Amino acid sequence: MNQGKGLVTRRSLLQVGALGFGSALLAACSQSAPAASPTTAPSAGAGAASSTSSAQTAATPASAQSGSAAAPATKPTVAAASAAAPAASTSGGAAPSGSIVFMDGINSHSKLCYQWAQEFSAATPGVKVQVNFIADGTQMVNQLLVQAAGGTPPDVFTFFQEIIPIDAAVERNLLFPIDDLIKRDNLDMSDFLPQAVNLNRWQGKLYALPRDYGNQQVYYNVDMFKKKGVPLPGTDWTDTTWTFDKYLEAAKALTETTGGKTTQWGILTSPVWRVWASFVYSNGGTVVKSDSNGVANAISLTDDAAVAGMQYLQDLIYKEKVAPEPAASTDLGPVDFFGTNKVGMLIGNPTQVTQFRAIKAFTWDVAPLPLGKTDKRGSGGGGTAWGMAKAGKNPDAAWALLKYITTAKAQLQEVAIGATTPSRSSVVNSTEFLSPTLPPKNSKSFAQAQGYVVRDPVNINWPTILSKVVTPNIQLLFGGKNDAKTVAQMIKTQADPMWGKT
C-alpha cells in the first residue's frame, strides 16, 4: 500500500506541525491545561524549560539537574511500580552507554521529565540523558521535524499522533520499529490496553509504546441536579437509559431565565474536534470512511446518523436554548465557567480532573456520554506515546529509556501530578488514579470509557483536512450560520479531494 506517495514532503509535515489546530486538538485529549505543579522546585535547567510559549533551545544534561518532581502522594499499590526497566542493548550485548536526547512535549512535565532522566541515569550509570522539554505539543513537533530533517533527531520523544498520524510518521522514517526489541527482551505487554498499543501499530509493526489513552466524559454539577430534582445521569457506559433525550431534559430543567436573560445554563457545548465528534459516534455515525488498510479516504458526515448528531448539538444552542452561543460565551475557560456554578454539564476529558478538583463550591461528578439512536456510545479520544527516532545514534540507550518511562512506576508518577489517563490497566485501575477520597465519586467511569474510544482518522493528510476544512465549517455549525446537513456537505465537498491516493 502506498499511502499518499509523492504527497509527503518535509514542507508538508512542517506545515502539519505549524498549523493552528494543534492547540485545539490537544485541549480535547491528553493536553489539558497544566496540572498543579509539584512543590519541589526544578533546577535552573528545568525552570528555563517551563515556558509554554517557546521551546527550550539547548538540551540540559540530566546529571546537571539538582531538583526533581515531587514523589507520589501515596505509596504505589501497583506491584510492578517498584521495578525499573532493566537496561539492555539492542544488539543483545553489554548494557547501554553514551549520551541520548529525550524530547518531552507534555505540558505538565516541566519537572517530571528531569526526574525521569535523573532516575534512569542512576539506574543506568553508563548513560547520560539530555532533556529537551517543550511545554507545547505543536511547538515540540515543529522542532522534532526540523531536527529529523537535519539528521539530528532526539533519541526518544513524545509521539503526538493527533498531530502526526502514524502513517505519516512511518513514511517519514521518524519512528524506530520496536517489535524485535520487545521480543528479544521478552517485554511484558499484557498490562497495556490493547487499543492503546494498536494506536501505534502500522502495517503489522509497532512503532511506539503508549503513554496514555483518553476519552470524553460528562462532568456535571451534582448539587444543581439535586436542587432542581433532576435524576442524576447514569454511571455505567453500558447504561441505555442515559440518552440524548434525557440529556436534553436535564439541560432544560437546569436552565434558568430571568427577565428574558439566561442566568444559568444547562449545558456548555464545544466545537472542539473530539468533543463534537463524540456526539456523531454516540448517534451511530462516523466522521470518515476508511479502506481495508484502515486509511481514511472519504468524509462520511453526510450520512443521516452523523448529520443528526451534529444537528442535535446545534439545536441545544439555537432551538432549545439550553447552551450559550459561542459569541455570547464567557471569556472564562470551560472548567472555570463550570466553577461559577452557572452551568450544569459540560464535556471534558479525564486529564482535566485536577482542574475540576479545585472547585470547592459544589459537588460534581462524571458520567458517560449520552446515547443517541445506536446501541453503543463512542468517544473521541486516543493517546500520546513514547517513540524512538529511527535515525537516532544510540538505539541501545534509547530503548532502555523508552522502557523506563513506560513502566507502571513512571505512569504512577504522572498520576501523582494529574498528568495522564494511564495506558496500563494496573495503573488506570489503581487506588492512586481512582483516588477514592477525592472527587469524582464515579472515577471508575474513566477506565470503563477507554473501551469506547474511537480513534482519529488515519491519513497523512488528515491534520490538514481537520485544520483547513473541518474546523472552520464546524464553527459555522456552532455559530448558527448553517444547519448540519449543509455543513456536512460543505466538509465533504471540500475535503474529499484532499485525501490523496491510497
Image: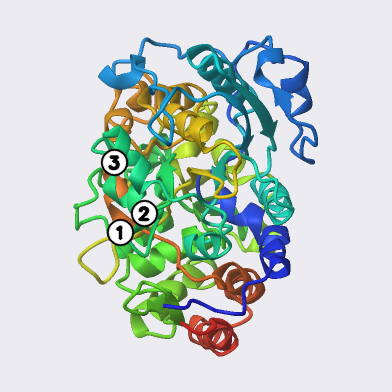
Residue 14 point in image, percent of width and height:
71, 62
In this rendered view, identify the residue nearer to me: 30 or 409.
409
Question: Of helix, strand and loop, which one carries label 3?
Answer: helix
In this rendered view, identify the residue nearer to me: 189 or 42.
189
The residue at the point 61 percent across, 40 percent down is: 393
The quadrant of the rendering that contains the C terminus is bottom left
Question: Of helix, strand and loop, which one carries label 2?
Answer: helix
* 389 horizontally vs 300: left or right: right
Q: Which residue is mark 1?
A: 246
Q: Measured along the vertical axis of the image, is residue 38 above or below residue 361?
A: above
Q: Is residue 66 visible?
A: yes
The quadrant of the rendering that contains the N terminus is bottom left
Local packing at callout 3 (Cα closer than 10 Å; few below 14, some 14-19, many 20+) is: few
Q: Amino acid at mark 2?
A: Ala
Front label number (2 vs 3): 3
Q: Of the residues under marks 2 and 3, which one precedes in the sequence?
A: 3
Residue 128 point in image, percent of width and height:
62, 21
In this rendered view, identify the residue nearer to me: 343 or 311.
311
Q: Amino acid at mark 3?
A: Lys
Alpha carbons under labels 1 and 2: distance apart: 6 Å
Alpha carbons under labels 1 and 3: distance apart: 49 Å
Local packing at callout 1 (Cα closer than 10 Å; few below 14, some 14-19, many 20+) is: some
Q: Measured along the vertical axis of the image, is residue 241 above or below residue 300?
A: above
Q: Which residue is mark 2?
A: 250
Residue 80 point in image, percent of width and height:
29, 20
Q: Which residue is mark 3?
A: 183
Look at the numbered discs 2 and 3 and tell me whether their residues touch, using CB distance below 8 Å.
no
Q: How many labels sit on residues?
A: 3
* 403 horizontally vs 486: left or right: left
